[in-house]
Structures are given as C-alpha cells and as structure tokens.
Image (cartoon, rainbow, N blue to C red):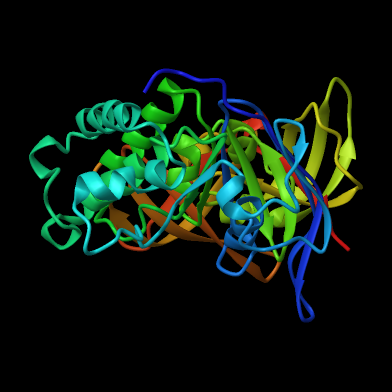
Amino acid sequence: MEQTDMAKLEIKNITKKFGDFYAANNISFTAEEGEFVTLLGPSGCGKTSLLKLIAGFHIADEGEILIGGKNVNEIPPEKRNTAMCFQSYALFPHLNVSHNICYGLKQRKIDINEQKQRLDLAIKQMDLEIHRLKLPNELSGGQQQRVALARAMVTRPDVILFDEPLSNLDAKLRESVRFEIKQLSKQYNLTSIYVTHDQAEALSMSDKIIVLNKGKIEQIGSPQEIYHHPINRFVADFIGIANITEAHVKEMENNLYEVNSIYGNFTVYSEIKPQSDHIYICFRPEDIEIVPASENKENMLTVDVTHTAFMGNITEIQALIRKDDKEQKLRLQLTKFPQLTENYQLSFCVPRDAIKFLESVK
C-alpha cells in the first residue's frame, strides 16, 4: 500500500440523543491527518455511538462532521470513504480470506489489477499468505483480526475506525496485534479513531486520548498529559490508579503550596494553580519513595499495610492511614518490598511534584 494523503477529521458540537439519553452531548474535537486518536471511557459513555456517527450509521441531531474540510452529515456510510474494523470482525463466513479483503474494493469498482496489487501487499503485510484461501472459521481469532484490519486498510480510507477490535483476543495476542495496528497506522499515515475501555491500549497506542463520560468529554490530551495531569477525579481514577482525597490549600511562593489533608501536611510544587482553597488532590501509587521510619522528611507518611500482592515486576500494596479518628485506604506500588512482619507499617515520602491538584470540593 503506497502512502496516500489522509484527511483531517473535525467533530464540531455533535449531539445525539436516543430518547432522553445523550449518546453525545455537544462533542467537539479534531483528529489531524495521520493522528491516532483513542476514545476512552466506561461502558455506556458514548464511545461507539460517536464512532457510528463518524461512519454514518447514526445521524447527528446537531453539529457537523467534516472530513478533509467537507461536511459529511448527509453523506451515506458507503460514500464517506471511512472504513470500520469491528469488534466482532464481521467477516463474511462464506468468503475466503482473499475475497473478504477484496470485498470493499469490488464494491468501489476498483480496477481488477489494482485490486490484485493491493490484496497481495495486504496479505504480505499481515502475514496471511498461507491462509489466503481459508474460510473465517478455519482461522484463529488473531488471524481473523488481521483479515479484518487488511480489509479496512486496502480501501485507502480517509479515516479508519476501530470499535474495540482486540476485546475478543487473549492477553498475549492482544498485545501483539496492538503493536501491529499502531505500526501500520504510522507507516501509512492513517487517520485513526480507536474505541476502547482498556486504558493500557489507550496509553500505549495513542497520539491523543479523549476521555468520555456520560456522553461528554472529560479531558483531551496526550497519554502523558492524561496520566500525569488528570483534570478531575473521574480521569485520575479511570486512567490507572490514583490515591484521591480532599485537601485544603494555601499558596506560598514560587509555585509552592501548603496542603493539609488526611495524609498530613504536604508541600506541593505545581505550575497549575488550584481551582480554590478546598480541592481534591491525588498521587499515583508508583510515585512514592520508601524511607526509614526513624527519619523525618518532607511529605512523609506512615501507613498500616493490610494486603500485598506480588505481581512479578512490582508488589501492589493496600494500606490504611489514620488521622483524627478517620481512616482512608491507599494503594501503593513498589519494585522492591521490604521483609514483612506482623502489624507491618510502611513509611514513605511523596515528592512535591507528584501531588496533583484536581477539581474543587463542592
């Protein structure tokens, strides 16, 4: 597949309702040419509905969808030059691998010689040569996924749409196919919209992540921005693991803040000002630094360890912190974990810049 110029996708104030339910509520974002954009969120947040709006399977109640600067709201799915890679693969059971891959090319009346060239190249790239005459029921899940991906890509779409394509694969195969999709998308400069509720997929594959919740956008950013600088409790808790609590904040100087919470008194460095003096804060389980209990260091906590789970490269810890007759659970992660004893207590520090300000407490 020679590289072609892919189109920019613009979603402008899109709204779609089913009865009283908002599948999309005033959604706006842009996917640049060649950009891999992931729609991430829990079940029912509107991810797949938004994908179907882009594909033309749903019609928006309000707003515009532009591909290459052209409004496609009234254009039927088969004429939008988008391609969908479905969760269920949607292969034709009576067609072999070659005929499944070429189906879209025949529908678009592509020259027969061009069809053959595109088919041969797709078969080679997806490592399907020995399977080209097999029917779908003779293939493994990973092989079926590669056929579905090849079928979507040979049409040279302006925008390629992925609807949780890896959810039916086992963990090891899912990781392998994940990298294949990312590599091919970059190799051919495909503008890709990828739907998933799997945060690991989103973080590892995306140029941009759009976190959705109840039909609305919570945050848009790079994987690094979404993970390290979540805008609110929903994003912090949904992407990875976060320890979240209420806190009172007092500004000091030079982007330093005095923060008081159940965790104790912290000094926090933040270039982003808190929304008020009563907010939520968070830090990630892996951000802590173990210190001896005898030391007295900044942002130091001592907690009661309640459970541990050895995960190979890390040990996950559940702990309790107690203050003023209150207690709160914490989750921690360590690459090295000290020897356990009864009634074990763990002391650690949280670096100044690891503590993030979230939204105000209402």
Q: Which image quarter is the N terminus in?
A: top left
Q: Is residue 68 left or right of residue 351?
A: right
140 lies left or right of 57? left
Residue 127 vs 83, above or below: the answer is above
Q: Residue furthest bottom?
A: 19
- Residue most extreme to the left: 130
Q: Position of residue 75 (x, y in %)?
A: 69, 51
Q: Kindly identify the residue that appears in the image at 26 percent across and 30 percent down.
A: 116
Between residues 16 and 196, which one lies in front from this camera angle? 16
Q: Residue at x 57, y 63 (%)?
A: 42
Q: Image point 85% across, 44% down: which residue? A: 249
Taking 198 as reference, is 213 left or right? right
Q: Is residue 119 above or below residue 11?
A: above
Using the rendered view, name the quadrant where residue 342 is placed: bottom left
Q: Nearer the viewer, residue 64 or 13?
A: 64
Q: Residue at point 41% right, 32% down?
A: 182
Q: Position of residue 10 (x, y in %)?
A: 74, 38
223 in relation to 49, above or below: above
> Which quadrant of the figure contains the C terminus?
bottom right
- Asked which quadrant contains residue 169, the reply is bottom left
